Amino acid sequence: MSPSGTDPIPTTEVGQTPIASQFYAGRYTEIVASTFDAGGPIADPDLAFVVGALTFLDRVDDAQMVLSTWSEAAPAARDPASRRTRAAGRFFLGLAAARAGYFERAHTLLVRQAMADRHAPDAWVRGFVFQGLACQRYFTGSYARAAGHALRAVQAAHAAGFVYLNMLATDLRGHALVQMGHLQRGIALLEQANQQARRVGLSNNAFAVDTSIASYVARFVPDQRALTRVEELLRRRSHDSYTRRALLTEAAVQRALRGRGRDAAQALDDADRDALRGDTRRGKVTSLLARLWVTRFADGIGACRDLVAQAHALIEPRDVGFRAELLAFVALLARADGDDAAEQVVVAELRELWRRSQHFAAKSALGQLDPGERGAVFDEDGLTPLLRAVAQRDGSALARIVAVGWYGVIPELLGLTPGRRIVLVPGEDLVVLEDHGEVVVRPRPPRWCPPLLRLLASGEASKARIVAELWGLRSYHPELHDPPVRTTIHRLRTFLAPHGDWVEVHADGYRTTVPVHLLGRVDPGPTTPSLWEEGEVPALDLHQPAGAPARPDEDGPLGAPDRVAAQVLGRLAGGRPASVPDLARALGLSPSTVLRALRGLVAHGEAERTGFARATRYRALASDDEIKDIR
C-alpha cells in the first residue's frame, strides 16, 4: 500500500500488521486478549486497532484510556505512523460515541479534533477523517451530507488502496440513501459493500451488512420472507452487540405485526439485557421503540403512555429517525384521548422534521396520520399504506392485512382493544383468535362453526339447545344426541387450537370462556350446510298417535333396501320435492333409513337432491310409469 503525498513511508506501516488483519476479520476478542488483557505493552502500529477492538466489544472506557495514554506520551508526534494511529483511534472512539447517542463527544472526536487532518497528504488519514464526518452527519440526521462525506472517504480509500475503509464508506452511503427512502439504490450500495467485504475475507463485516439489508427490507416490504431472513441471521453468531441488538429489535417488531406476541417479548428481553450491559443511550432507545410496537398490539395504544415518556427522556433531538418514530406514537396517543389539537401539533412537528431531514420515518408517520398525505409515501414503501389503514380503522384493508400475514394488527384495525376473544369475519371467511398480541387466523372455517360459536357465546348453551338450533330437531334425547354433540364440540376445539380450552363444559352443556365478536351480519341462508346432512342425526318420534303401526325393523323384511327404496320413490311420484323428515313421517320409517334409501336412489339416477341442510329436498327423476314398474 503506497499512500499519496510526500511523507516517508514507515517501516512497519499502521494498518498492515497482523493485529490489523485480525481487526479487519472481526476477531476483536482475540486482539484484546492478546494485547490489552495480557497486560503487556501495545506496539504503536497496533494501538489504533486495539482501540477499535475494545470499542466494538463495548469497552469504550478501556479504549479511551489506551488512546489517551499513548497521546500523552507522544502529544506532538507528526510522523506518518502517529498521524495514522491518531486518525484511526479517534474515528473508532467517535463512532462508538455516535452509535451510543453521545453526539457532543462524537462531534469533538470526529469533527473538532479531526478537521485539521482533512487535507492531510496521506490518503489513509484523509479517508478516516471523511468517514468520521459522514458518521457524525448520519447519526444526527443530515443524510445527504453524510452521503457526500462518505463519497469523499471512498475516493480517499481508493487512493490509499485501503479496502476496509472503502467498504465502510460504501456501506454508509447505502445507509444514508435508505434513510431518505431510496431503498433500491441504498440496497445496491450495501450489496456492493457486502461483496467487497467477502472478497477480502471480512466475514464479520459482511454479516453486519447482511443484517442491515434484512432490517431495511423488513421495514419497507411487508413480506413473511423479510422476517424469515432476520430470524435466520439471529441464529448465527453476531460479532458485536450493536448488530445483534438491531436484529433482536427488528425481529420483535416484525413478530408483533404478525401476531407472535410472546416471541416478540422474548426478543425484547434479550435486547434489553444487551442494552443494559452496554449502557448506551441509543441501545436503550432502540429497545424502547421496539417495545412500543409490541405493547401497542398486545395491550393497546393506551398502555404505551409510560414507555413514550421514557423514550422521550432519552431521545436526543438530533436523532431524527428515533424522534420521528416516537412522534407517531405520541400522535396516536393524542388520537386515542380525543385530543385533536395535540395530534395536529405533532403532525406539524413531523412535517418540519421531514422538511429538515428527509428521513423516511418522518414521511411514513405523516402518511399514517395526515389525511393530506398519500398512502404510499415512497414508491418502494409497502408498509405505510397498511399502517395507515390500521391507524384510520379502515376495515376494507383486512384482506390485504391477512394476505401479508399481519395478524397482530387485526384487533386495532377493527377498533378493538387487544384482549382475549374470538372474531368471526364472514366476509373474508375467517375466524380470528386473539390473546393479547398472540393472534391466530383460521381461514375457511366449517360452515357449522360460526353459528355454533355464536350459540356458545350467548350463554350456557344446553345440549338440547345445541341440537335444536344447530340441526333443527325439536326433541332432544341424550342417548341419541349426546354422541354427535360431543363430536361436534371436539371438532370445534380442534379447529380453535391452540385455544381449544376456550370452549368449556358446564352443568347442562357448553359455553365459551371468551367473548365472540361478529364482524358484519351473517345470513345463514339455505345454502349453508350443517355438520351432518338432514336426517343423519338420529331422532326419536315419541309422539306417535295411539294405534299407529310400529316402525318396521330395519333388518326385517319390510326394512329390506329394495323395499324401502320402492316406498320412498313411490312417495316422490308426481315430482313434488320432499324432505327427509316429511318422508320419514309419511312412511313410518326412521330418518336415517329414509336417508340411506334416498342416497341409493340419487346414486342410481332415480332421484335428485337440491338444497342444503334444512333446505334439502329430494324429487323423483323416473317417470310415473317407471315408478309403477318398480312397485
Image (spheres, rainbow, N blue to C red):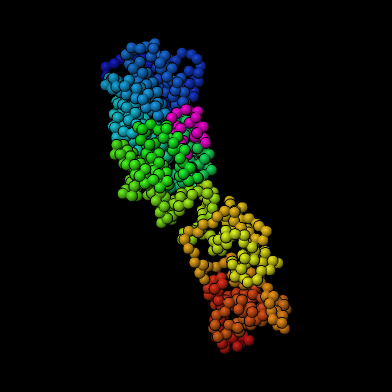
**Relative horizontal placement of residue 109, taking residue 547 as reference (left or right):** left
Q: Is residue 499 magenta?
A: no
On-image quarter of the C terminus = bottom right
Quarter of the rendering containing residue 586: bottom right
Q: What's the residue at 34%, 22% (across, down)? A: 108
* Relative to 122, residue 516 above or below: below
Residues in magenta, as a range? 269-291
What secondary structure is the stretch in magenta mostly built from? helix
Which residue is at a point 32% across and 48% down the rendered structure image? 373
Residue 454, image x and y in percent?
A: 55, 61
How many numbered markers are drawn? 0
Residue 32 locus on image (x, y percent): 48, 21
Q: Is residue 102 above or below residue 333?
A: above
Work out whether 499 lies above or below 24. below
Residue 271: give x, y in percent of width and height: 49, 34
Q: Can residue 170 be seen from the camera position used here?
A: no
Q: Which residue sits at x=61%, y=55%?
A: 503
Query: Residue at the location (42% across, 43% down)?
Result: 333
Is-magenta flag for residue 272? yes
Residue 624 visible in the picture: yes
Q: Quarter holding the N terminus? A: top left
Between residues 387 and 219, which one lies in front from this camera angle? 387
The location of residue 498, given as percent across then percent down, is 58, 51
Q: Is residue 488 left or right of residue 369?
A: right
